[in-house]
Amino acid sequence: MVHGIRVHAVGGPDCLKWEEIEVGAPGPGEVRIRQRAAGLNYIDVYHRTGLYPVALPAVIGMEGAGDVVALGEGVTSLAVGDRVAYGSVLGGYAEERLIPADRLVKLPGGITYETAAAMMLQGMTVRYLLRETYKVGPETVLLFHAAAGGVGLIACQWARALGATLIGTVSTDEKAELARANGATHVIVTSREDFVARVAEITGGKGCDVVYDSIGNDTYLGSLDCLRPRGMWVSFGNASGPVPPVDLKLLKGSLFATRPTLMAYVATHAELAENAADLFQMVESGAIKIVVNQTFPLKDAALAHEALEARRTTGSTVLTI
């Protein structure tokens, strides 16, 4: 018997229960993996609170890395002992788990389990945001909210590698220093600065080509005001609560709005492999450094959730197994 974190009823961090779980043998097309690390992401909070409903009881967690220990019928792409990682399949808060083989990618030798667990969901998210949702290049001026978070710090580095101008928002001066160190061109401290006014000042009134908004309710109106005509608002998170129904008249200036998800961009194994390969190349080249600033034992996932929701974390957080 192995252990994992299971949710029986939605609620606060105290609903995360460390329990014995039964994993079983892999079915056709599946593998069983012994996990070495799991990633902490805001989508885990959404699953825990019921904002994004999942069938209960559930082992939450969307990101992890480990070793293949058993193969199901028909699996030929992997072998027992392979080091693997994933970033889009529920069930990561466990010592061992079953997972479809086509949702896994093999880890390059130079990337540790902890780094993989910190980068798969977050790094692949940045990859689709900057390379597919809106194709960022040297001429792009973008606003990225929560620039000192796990996704934000990767975005700062990737935007720098692309030659783009990234304006980041953060809540403290300490986080501002971190965002600048990772490549943010300009940083706005929202606890004492109006980000809409500062964006207008930084861009000479022209606005941004694209705004990446994972905050949600508290920022969406201001985000729209930061865009140039025909700019794009990318709403990919709800850290402050969900965005209410949007009146299309708010998209003044012929603005575009989208609500992307990672799963839609890695729906096939070919798409997953392409995204992951691009991410691995950026990390192995040194263009992107994955910053793991907090680690918690998996059994203490509730403490990790408390820290994340209280905005006490920077960079990525890993649950060690």
Image (spheres, rainbow, N blue to C red):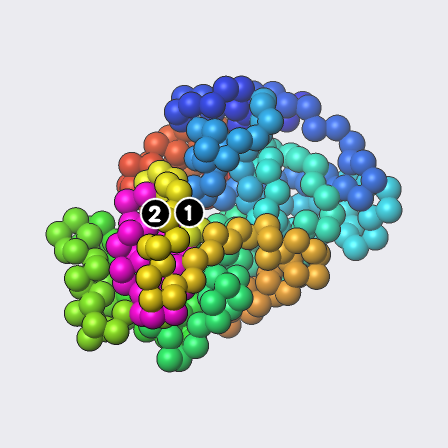
Residue sticking out furthest to the bottom:
139
Name the residue located 70 percent from the left edge and 61 percent from the top edge: 270
- At label 2, which amino acid type do we have? Ile
The quarter of the picture where the C terminus appears is top right
Residue 209 lies, in percent from the top left, at 36, 70
Sequence-earlier tag: 1 or 2: 2
Residue 154 lies, in percent from the top left, at 41, 60
Vertical relation: 215 (above or below) 305: below
Q: Secondary structure beneath disc 2?
A: loop
- Whether residue 190 sits left or right of residue 232 in the image: it is left
Residue 147 lies, in percent from the top left, at 32, 57
Q: Secondary structure beneath disc 1?
A: loop
Q: Residues within 10 Å of mark 1 (few under 14, many from 20)?
A: many
Residue 285 lies, in percent from the top left, at 50, 72
Residue sticking out furthest to the front:
249
- Whether residue 180 sits left or right of residue 198 in the image: it is right
Q: Is residue 76 magenta?
A: no
Dot 2 corresponds to which residue?
Answer: 215
Q: Is residue 12 visible?
A: yes
Vertical relation: 31 (above or below) 231: above
- At label 1, which amino acid type do we have? Gly
Front residue (pair 292, 210): 210
Front residue (pair 230, 110): 230
Q: Is residue 220 magenta?
A: yes
Gap between marks 1 and 2, in whole Å?
6 Å
Dot 1 corresponds to which residue?
Answer: 237
Q: Which segment is the magenta one?
A: 210-234
Residue 175 placement: quadrant: bottom left
Name the residue located 59 percent from the left edge and 38 percent from the top edge: 90
Instruction: Answer whether labels 1 and 2 touch (C-beta < 8 Å).
Output: yes
